[in-house]
Image (tube, grey):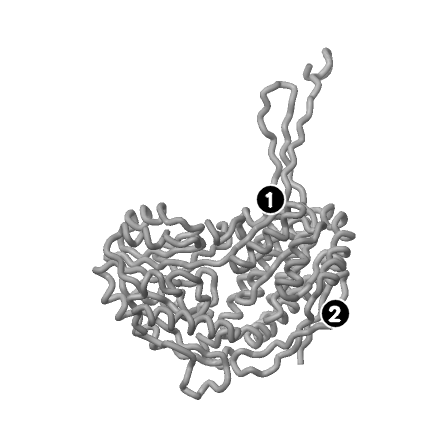
């Protein structure tokens, strides 16, 4: 049985409260191990060690920090298979997706190893000839990071790599549902030379460990991926010392199918983005909005794609779609389906937990499509965060746009069209942090990722991913002219 203890001050430690939670394999319910649950006292101790390490790490030259990050990425790559197996056992996703997640995580680490060396200061113009203005960037201080269970390794890297590259020690609250792959990545960082105190792991619940991290007076900034409600709690708790925040929160992505779309390509993309990781993705497709001319052929193609999905335990050879991660996902998905059907929607694929009997006691839920979903039904208004996609026909392009922008969420949207100019014009008017045109993934290593409206603020990835961890400083100085007769005078 695996065990994930707390880690801070360069050592593994038991939780002060001696509280632990079981971690079970979603594919069969078997016990994978146990995870320590940090209390506010544990968080305070971890922050204390980070404070002691802060000055030394902030003054380490960027080239040295970059070298450590590169070595960490190399070691994670060398251990990719064992970390991927851990991730699949605890989270449920197919092994091929676990490998893909970890590979992208190491790309992120290497990217920030270099980007941290390129955050240059600037010399700004002055209104006076003898005054110089220098703008430089400095580490913000001890950083906090809150990581979710859907992509734990990937999002751990999105937060830890830029924090360390910027010169900030970082205290991480990993998800207690999926702690083991993160722990394995943490071990890689420590083995390649991250100094004691610079990196801490305090897994625990949001109301206890998360709140303690957000409210701690010695945490200068926090990067968190969470639900809208959790993000609002983080903001309230962070107000005491006006922490810098980067919050990537819930989404409710529309997938717009225009009449000139390539129907087959759009259907394949909608299926994959709806049901990859069993819909447990912040940029998953929630609402599929179709133009009347595209509706019938698109729905037929999408139903065919969806019904072809085969569920299997993530470690089975060739598995592409696995179980959901927690029973709460099943409960919420079923509640959303029942609400939509009760209001007039029609189930055209799936509809509930797997009942074939061949998958045993795992948390398997059939990928579900709902046609003619009313606009006030739960799948059309709340994030399901499960394998459910609701379809709605809209009467015009203007209606497609209005329905897309009607909710309080604004993380990602998708447009499928054969007319690039029309799609681009629509994308300009969509109120989302990212829009994919004829692509079903809006994340890109060198471009900022984040939301509008209740989907949060701040950005991860790209050069912007460093911003929350750096403080700008303006240094204004008077420069005396050279004395008469001096060389060059």
Q: Position of residue 448 (x, y in %)?
A: 50, 50
Badge 1 marks a residue whose secondary structure is loop
Locate residue 110 relative to residue 199 in the image: left or right: left
Tell me residue 141's x, y (percent). Answer: 69, 48
**Residues at marks 2 and 1, CA–CA distance in whole angstroms:** 43 Å
Earlier residue among tags 2 and 1: 2
Name the residue rendered at 53%, 69% in the picture.
99
* Most foreground residue, 386 or 80: 386
Left or right? Give the position of 264 relative to 362.
left
Query: What residue is pinned by disc 2?
Result: 17
Which residue is most to the bottom? 357
Q: Is residue 79 visible?
A: no
Left or right: residue 42 versus residue 297 is right
Q: Residue at x 37, y 56 (%)?
A: 414
Q: Which residue is mark 1?
A: 118
Q: Say the numbered circle drawn on residue 144.
A: none
**Which residue extends farthest right?**
52
Extreme residue toward the top, this view? 484
Q: Secondary structure at mark 2?
A: loop
| Location of residue 300 in the rendering, given as x and y in whole percent from the top left corner | 26, 70
Give the answer, above or below, for where 160 lies relative to 138: below
386 lies left or right of 471: left
């Amino acid at each position: 049985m695996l065990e994930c203890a707390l880690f801070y001050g360069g050592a593994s430690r038991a939780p002060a409260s001696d509280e632990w939670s079981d971690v079970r394999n979603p594919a069969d319910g078997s016990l994978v191990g146990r995870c320590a649950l940090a209390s506010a006292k544990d968080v305070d101790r971890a922050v204390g060690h980070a404070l002691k390490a802060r000055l030394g790490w902030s003054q380490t030259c960027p080239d040295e920090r970059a070298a450590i990050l590169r070595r960490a990425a190399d070691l994670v790559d060398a251990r990719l298979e064992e970390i991927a197996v851990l991730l699949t056992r605890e989270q449920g996703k197919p092994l091929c997706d676990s490998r893909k997640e970890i590979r992208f995580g190491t790309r992120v680490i290497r990217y920030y190893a270099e980007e941290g060396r390129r955050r240059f200061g600037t010399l700004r113009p002055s209104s006076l000839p003898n005054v110089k203005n220098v703008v430089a960037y400095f580490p913000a201080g001890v950083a906090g990071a809150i990581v979710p269970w859907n992509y734990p390794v990937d999002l751990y890297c999105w937060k830890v790599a830029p924090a360390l590259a910027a010169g900030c020690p970082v205290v991480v609250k990993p998800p207690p549902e999926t702690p083991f792959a993160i722990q394995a990545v943490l071990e890689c960082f420590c083995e390649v030379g991250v100094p004691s105190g610079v990196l801490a792991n305090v897994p625990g619940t949001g109301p206890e460990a998360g709140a303690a991290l957000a409210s701690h007076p010695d945490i200068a900034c926090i990067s968190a991926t969470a639900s809208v409600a959790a993000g609002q709690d983080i903001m309230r708790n962070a107000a005491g010392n006006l922490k810098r925040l980067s919050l990537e929160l819930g989404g409710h992505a529309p997938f717009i199918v225009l009449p000139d779309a390539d129907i087959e390509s759009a259907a394949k993309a909608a299926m994959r983005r709806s049901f990859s990781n069993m819909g447990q993705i912040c940029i998953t497709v929630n609402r599929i909005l179709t133009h009347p001319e595209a509706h019938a052929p698109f729905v037929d193609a999408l139903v065919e794609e969806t019904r072809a999905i085969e569920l299997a335990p993530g470690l089975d050879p060739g598995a592409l779609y696995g179980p959901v991660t927690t029973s709460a996902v099943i409960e919420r998905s079923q509640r959303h389906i029942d609400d939509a059907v009760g209001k007039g929607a029609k189930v055209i694929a799936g509809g509930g937990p797997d009942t074939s009997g061949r998958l045993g006691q795992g948390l398997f839920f059939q990928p579900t499509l709902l046609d003619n979903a009313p606009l006030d039904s739960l799948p059309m208004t709340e994030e399901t965060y499960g394998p459910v996609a609701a379809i709605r026909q809209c009467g015009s392009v203007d209606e497609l746009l209005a329905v897309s922008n009607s909710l309080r969420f604004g993380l990602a949207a998708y447009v499928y069209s054969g007319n690039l100019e029309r799609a681009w014009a629509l994308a300009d008017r969509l109120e989302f942090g990212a829009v994919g045109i004829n692509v079903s993934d809006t994340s890109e290593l060198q471009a900022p990722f984040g939301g509008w409206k209740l989907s949060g603020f701040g950005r991860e990835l790209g050069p912007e991913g460093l911003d929350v961890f750096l403080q700008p400083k303006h240094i204004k100085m008077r420069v005396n002219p050279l004395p008469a007769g001096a060389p060059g005078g």
